[in-house]
Amino acid sequence: MHINLIIFISSLNEPDVSKAMMKTYESNIRPVKGDIIDDPGFHPEFHNGYEVAKVTLNYAVDACWVSLSPLAIEVENIEVRRYIDHLEVHDWQELPKEKIV
């Protein structure tokens, strides 16, 4: 099954920078609300895992959409742009607004 992880990132210090990011895995393990997801893209200065907030299954296309708890960066040890760059290096991609489920 395609597991599509989605995280929303915004910053109080940089209100112009907010993005929805997505990474897709192929897995037989289906997350459930409350699970903690870890990924190498999560920068250690911010987070080492995010809680699953919502799971949407689409059996017709063998896909699972997993919304992770939003990341609102208030205390920034690094800039939000650097955090997004770190995600992108680890195969996270910006999710266009029209594709958000």
Image (cartoon, helix red, strand yellow):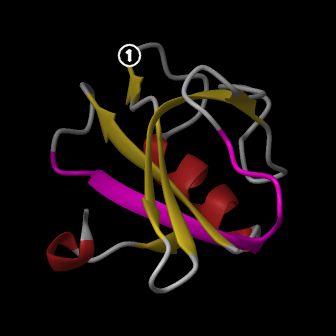
Instruction: Look at the numbered disc 1 and give the secondary structure of its residue.
Output: loop
- The quarter holding residue 60 reads bottom left
How many numbered markers are drawn? 1
Give the residue furthest to the top.
Answer: 75
Report crowding for label 1: few under 14, some 14 to 19, many 20 or more residues within 10 A (C-alpha).
few
Residue 21, percent from left and from top: 45, 61
Tell me which amino acid carries mark 1: Glu
Residue 58, percent from left and from top: 43, 70
Point out the image quarter for the N terminus: bottom right
- The quarter holding residue 77 reads top right
Magenta-drawn segment = 16-31
In percent of the image, x 47 and y 13: which residue is there?
75
Residue 6 within the magenta-colored segment of the rendering: no
- The quarter holding residue 74 reads top left
Point out the image quarter for the C terminus: bottom left
In percent of the image, x 18 and y 70: which residue is there?
97
In percent of the image, x 49 and y 86: which residue is there?
61
Instruction: Work out whether 75 lies above or below 15.
Output: above
Q: Nearer the viewer, residue 55 or 88?
A: 55
Residue 29 within the magenta-colored segment of the rendering: yes
Residue 91, percent from left and from top: 70, 74
Instruction: Work out whether 41 lies above or below 15.
Output: below
Q: Which residue is mark 1?
A: 74
